[in-house]
Image (cartoon, rainbow, N blue to C red):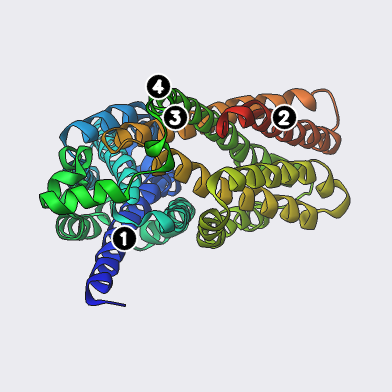
Amino acid sequence: MSQTSYQSALSSSAALCALGLTTLVSSMSSSIASIGLPTLAAFFHATFSQIQWVVLTYLLAVTGSVLAMGWLSDRYGRRRLLAAGVLLFTLSSLGCGLADRLGWLIAARLVQGLGGAMMLVNSLALVVQVVPAERSGRAMGVMGSLSALGTAMGPAFGGVLVAAFGWRALFLINLLPGLLLWLLIRHSLPPVSDSAKARNPASLMPADTAATARSAAMTDADRLPASRSMTASKLDPLLRQRTLACGLLLSLVVAAVMMTTLVVGPFYLAAGLHLNPRQSGLLMALGPLVAVAAGLPAGQLVDRIGSDRATVFSLLAAAAGCGLLAVLPQTMGRGGYAIGLILLTAGYALFQASNNTALLKGADPARSGLISGMMNLSRNLGFLGGAGLMAAVYAAAGRGLPAVDAASRGLNVTFGLAAGLILLALVAARPWRNPA
């Protein structure tokens, strides 16, 4: 490896490290506060309906602002907005930790959610700019693993912090990582990350180098006769819009299905398999563990076979996992539940890597922040909608039956519906996903 190639790889690794840690910290903050709700309720003398806003405010702030943050990052620069988001997140974490009234804590969590949205949107959008195209799938896989790891470790790490230092540590723990991340982002991300330069990368090169790059970047479509080239240029934006719409639809459906394991799973494990909370928690922890372990291999598979084919495989695996969850636990108990959950989560990890790669790798650099915001929005809407829909289906399916029979019937119907939704979305999106 030449000295230039080595320095380029080292710079890319440092940038990916900064973006991955940003994803980890922001994802962990979405779940870490949940473990401290009983302690917070006692401290502030609040009811459950009041104290739950400590968690809900953060999630709603992220969901409601990701599109705006994506637009801002495209307009003012992704590296700049990412650094500002980390700084805002860190300062609001200090505000959360120092709050002496519940209203102030909720207000600080709102600001923290805005900072978290800036971090999530820009870290994902910047990946395709700092990582070589042939390794973008692996990079997306790593980002997916870190997101799953942050969400999974939040409650466990938060429980240790609350037990050792009290509830304020849930928020003050972000101060040192936040400041270090801010410095790392400022020094590891290249200036080309800014939107103005992303719109015209050739402006960074000498004139002769830029001309050579433009010539080397010509595709077969560029060499077609003028009439065919003009037709392709008119169709490409439409095809990209269709691909984006299909990717967002699939993301929403898959997120809703994954939420089924978090909403329906605990009820079935308790009523259907008679597991206590500790046993249920350990079994459900398989999901995040599989997501973490499968992230990098999933990304490598995307780079090897392509995002379109990997997306199909991932959806088929997720649908098969739902099908197994609908029937196996009633005959094999917790082992059957584990098999279905592992297959479903592995499919989800592969889907995240392939779908994110497909939507961002070929995106217009000037719009990648907005697209990243749309991806986060579709996923969060899927989580929120899936929680309400699947819980209602589970309850309705078992209404009027004895507890065990109601749990089994609810599991059959809910995960059967989830498998059907995935297959239906795949069939509907397939003709538009890769028109060629």
- Pick whichever of labels 4 and 1 is earlier in the sequence: 1
Report the amino acid beneath label 1. Answer: Phe
- Pick whichever of labels 1 and 3 is earlier in the sequence: 1
Q: Looking at the image, which residue is at 32% across and 57% down?
A: 21
Gap in Å between the C-alphas at discs 4 and 3? 11 Å
Report the amino acid beneath label 2. Answer: Tyr
Mark 1, secondary structure of its residue: helix
- Dot 1 corresponds to which residue? 165
Q: Nearer the viewer, residue 425 or 338?
A: 425
Q: Nearer the viewer, mark 4 or mark 3?
A: 4
The image's mark for residue 240 is 3
Q: Looking at the image, which residue is at 67% across and 44% down?
A: 318
Q: Looking at the image, which residue is at 32% across and 31% down?
A: 370
Q: Nearer the viewer, residue 202 or 47?
A: 202
Report the amino acid beneath label 4. Answer: Lys
Give yes or no for contact between labels 1 and 2 (Cβ–Cβ under 8 Å).
no
Gap in Å between the C-alphas at discs 1 and 3? 50 Å
Tell me the quadrant of the picture where the N terminus can be found.
bottom left
- Pick whichever of labels 3 and 2 is earlier in the sequence: 3
Q: Residues within 10 Å of mark 2 (few under 14, many from 20)?
A: many
Q: Looking at the image, which residue is at 44% across and 26% down?
A: 228
